[in-house]
Image (cartoon, rainbow, N blue to C red):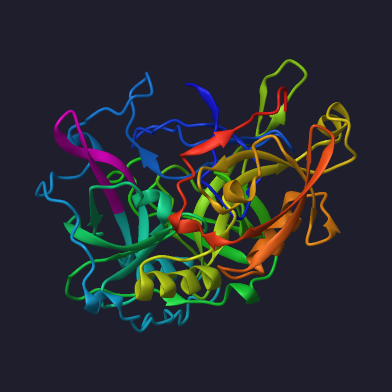
Amino acid sequence: MGSTKRKKGSGAFGVVVIVLVVLLLASCVTGFFLLRKSGEAIFNSVSGFVSGNDGKQQSIKPAESGVTTPTPAPTAAPTESDREMPELDGAVPSIGSDSGNPIPTIFENVSPSVVGVVQYRTMDGILSVYGSGTGFIVSSKGYILTNAHVVEGAELVTVMLPDGEEIDAKVIGIDSDTDVGVLKVEHEGLKALAIGNSDDVRVGEFVLAIGNPLDMKRLANTLTFGIISAKSREITIEGQTNSYLQTDAAINYGNSGGPLLNMRGEVIGINSAKSITAGYDSFGNPISAEGIGFALPINTSVEIMRILIEKGTVERPAVGITVYTLTEAQAAKLNVEKGVYVESVVKDGPAFKAGVKAGDIIIKVNGSELADQSELVKVINSCKIGDSIDLVLLRNGEEISCTIQLGNKTEMNFKDAEKETLPDN
């Protein structure tokens, strides 16, 4: 497994992380490992993917993953009628006399609305299972919420219903920045989950997680129980920083995209990631972390879902660079007090055209001193596409000023960028 820095191109300037990218066996416990040197924390997206020991994608027989082979045709494109925001018509379960322990009643009511999500890609000339995760129905019209990373890059996406029936799904839209994905299936008798209010969640509140960990078929609709450990955790995963609900309810590979529910049976979050390593001891051995899972708040997810349904994509302002905050040691080595290091510049992007180069250090934005990449994120996010920002850069000890007009991030190819890695960063 090779170690490489990965950044999903962001005008939001996510903190640089060292990424060990491992495509997962749907039945094994390996994943996208994201190691942040700052804090020494590892976060994993919790979906299952197919891989060989050499890291190359391998075809597996559908029987091994617990799914049947679908018709080898690409996922259908959304139609105009799919672009109408549906009514979120889920009903809160009636707990009745089970108020002492409502969990069994909640599960019986909500589990039919939790589905498996299967991603197919062509490997060695065969359309094969590439990955799997979880999703949940939010509208009886067939709309399903999941994580973007569960379906991103798929040639075909199917949904596995609780009764074992596998049906084709349309990818209505994905947003990699927030890791929200929206699917739609055509099927009668679908039951939607009730949507709660994640802003009202309290630390210590009991929660339930439902998903398909490790094995889509044998462990489908696994229920786990825990509490809300924290709110508004700013966590960087695959270069994107989002605010998460933290929970100790057990989630594992394959749980990605599943619902986190309160004790009324309402969805308050989308289970998305977990931390498996708290750091390293003096001998370099990993120190395991337990019970640290993260869910995207449902309020944010529904907002993104609405945009994806109506527009198909989320437009965001960006300048076309990836950056990270300099540590004290790095700043001292570069003979600067503080700043934000420019790791890459998208070719022909706004920053590139303004003269920004990889290896530059940003010290001011709009006249204010800049000490942390998050401050730059806030400035960018407060702007609109077409607005301009002023930067002051340090390059070889010389201050350089430039004005950058923000562009549309979705139109920028962050894979085509000039890079400059700071040694021993």
- Image quadrant of residue 105? bottom left
Q: Where is residue 250 in the image (x, y as percent from the top left)?
A: 53, 48
Q: Residue 43: say if magenta.
A: no
Residue that sits furthest to the top in the current view = 283
Residue that sits furthest to the left in the current view = 71
Residue 333 visible here: yes
Residue 204 visible here: no
Q: Where is residue 233 in the image (x, y as percent from the top left)?
A: 68, 57
The residue under the point 13% across, 44% down is 69
* Residue toward you, 263 or 345: 345
Report the quarter where the C terminus lies: top right
The residue under the point 49% across, 68% down is 301
Total numbered circles: 0
Range shown magenta? 117-132
Answer with left or right where residue 67 lies relative to residue 382.
Answer: left
Q: Where is residue 244 in the image (x, y as percent from the top left)?
A: 61, 59
Answer with left or right where residue 201 lies relative to residue 416.
Answer: right
Q: Residue 120: say if magenta.
A: yes
Q: Is the magenta region chiefly helix, strand or loop?
A: strand
* Residue toward you, 102 or 349: 349
For residue 318, above or below residue 324: below
The residue under the point 54% across, 73% down is 299
